[in-house]
Image (spheres, rainbow, N blue to C red):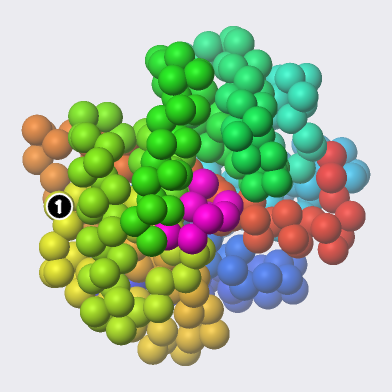
């Protein structure tokens, strides 16, 4: 794992130096750096900046992509595609389809569009996503907001009846609360992540999450609600005391770094993300399907964090297109 931290520090340092006067929130830079670390895609600063500048030149004056979010989108296109410039236009077409389907303009819809960007995404997916989102709001009107767009769209890509899917999410929400997790948007996100798990008994997943919660407490880690989605991520692998010990060791290492010591909560999330991506790299062929699911979840969770940071940034600069 040390190589991931070293890579993270190196990429962050390059980005921080280059974007010092362009990005107001250092967490945005941390998130961009993490995308390269978890993707295993080589980072080349000049290429990244060129893609970022291209995005800025292709959008309107008041677009959210004129601001910090364009760096995240540039990174996502760079790590996934050999021709990011062409893919950007495909991506923006998907975004436009979301707006046409009723999604609000802004960071969360842009990140949601990225979860849909693939060669075989069905045309009506935007409408399916809005349907899932509306059903989420029917269950939890005051909890469900724009930050749930990425997961609504990710869930909409499953070949499952929407009513059944929403009931699965609701069952997880109820069981997790009964197991000691506090109600709220973070618990809802946790339920979304668990509902994407195929092949494991729901009761077993809830049991794993409760065990992880207890193991974190035994390690002296106060498990804030914001960490609930990451506990759900960890439940995708075998739960044992060593897993949490690994998370804590990596978390402590990030906290000890001068570059990151003021972002302890985000460091905890990064620790889980890096650990899970490392397990994907060292999996065997029998676990390939699960690895793909975990990788998708990591990207979705990164996307949600990125969109949250970017939405705050955009609100201070006026971007909303």
Quadrant where the C terminus sits is: top right
- Asked whether, in this view, residue 217 is left or right of residue 164, the answer is left
Residue 8: percent from the left, percent from the top? 40, 68
Residue identifier under label 1? 238
On the image, which quarter does residue 21 sit in?
A: bottom right
Assess whether residue 185 is covered by the magenta stretch: yes
Q: Which residue is at a point 27% across and 37% down the rendered structure image?
A: 202
Does residue 89 sit above or below 49 in this rendering?
above
Is residue 290 visible in this depiction of the protein? yes
Q: How many labels does the image show?
A: 1
Is residue 18 part of the magenta span, yes or no? no
Direction from residue 139 to residue 160 in the image, left or right: left
- Dividing the picture into quadrants, the one containing residue 20 is bottom right
Q: Please report the bounds of the magenta region as a residue range.
A: 181-188
Q: In which quarter of the image is the N terminus?
A: bottom left
Kindly give the residue lying farthest to the top in the view shown. 123
Q: Which of 87 and 45 is in front in this view?
A: 87
Q: Where is residue 112 in the image (x, y as percent from the top left)?
A: 60, 35
Residue at 30%, 77% in the rendered image: 217
- Residue 191, percent from left and from top: 43, 43
Evaluate whether residue 277 shows in this view.
Answer: no
Hey, which quadrant is residue 253 in on the image? bottom left
| Rendering coords of residue 266 (x, y %) | 49, 70
Q: How crowded is mark 1: few (under 14 residues within 10 Å), some or many (20 or more)?
A: few
Which one is nearer the viewer's eye here, 27 or 154?
154
The secondary element bearing badge 1 is classed as loop
The one nearer the camera, 164 or 25, is 164
Tell me the residue at 76%/61% (across/down). 313
């Amino acid at each position: 794992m040390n190589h991931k931290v070293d890579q993270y520090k190196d990429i962050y340092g390059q980005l921080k130096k280059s974007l010092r006067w362009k990005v107001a929130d250092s967490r945005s830079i941390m998130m961009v750096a993490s995308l390269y670390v978890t993707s295993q895609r080589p980072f080349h600063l000049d290429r990244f900046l060129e893609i970022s500048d291209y995005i800025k030149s292709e959008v309107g004056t008041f677009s959210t992509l004129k601001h910090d979010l364009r760096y995240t989108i540039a990174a996502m296109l760079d790590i996934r595609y050999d021709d990011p410039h062409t893919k950007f236009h495909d991506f923006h077409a998907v975004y436009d389809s979301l707006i046409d389907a009723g999604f609000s303009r802004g960071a969360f819809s842009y990140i949601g569009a990225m979860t849909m960007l693939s060669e075989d995404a069905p045309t009506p997916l935007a409408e399916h996503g809005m349907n899932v989102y509306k059903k989420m709001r029917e269950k939890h009107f005051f909890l469900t907001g724009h930050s749930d767009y990425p997961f609504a769209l990710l869930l909409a890509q499953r070949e499952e009846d929407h009513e059944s899917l929403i009931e699965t999410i609701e069952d997880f929400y109820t069981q997790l609360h009964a197991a000691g997790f506090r109600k709220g948007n973070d618990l809802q996100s946790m339920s979304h992540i668990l509902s994407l798990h195929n092949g494991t008994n729901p009761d077993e997943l809830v049991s794993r999450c409760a065990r992880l919660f207890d193991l974190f407490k035994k390690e002296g880690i106060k498990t804030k609600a914001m960490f609930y989605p990451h506990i759900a991520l960890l439940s995708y692998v075998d739960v044992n005391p060593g897993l949490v010990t690994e998370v804590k060791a990596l978390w402590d290492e990030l906290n000890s770094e001068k570059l990151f010591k003021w972002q302890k909560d985000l460091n905890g999330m990064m620790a889980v993300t890096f650990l899970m991506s490392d397990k994907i790299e060292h999996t065997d062929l029998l676990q390939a399907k699960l690895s793909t699911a975990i990788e998708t979840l990591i990207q979705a969770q990164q996307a949600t964090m990125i969109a949250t940071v970017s939405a705050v940034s955009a609100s201070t600069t006026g971007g909303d297109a």
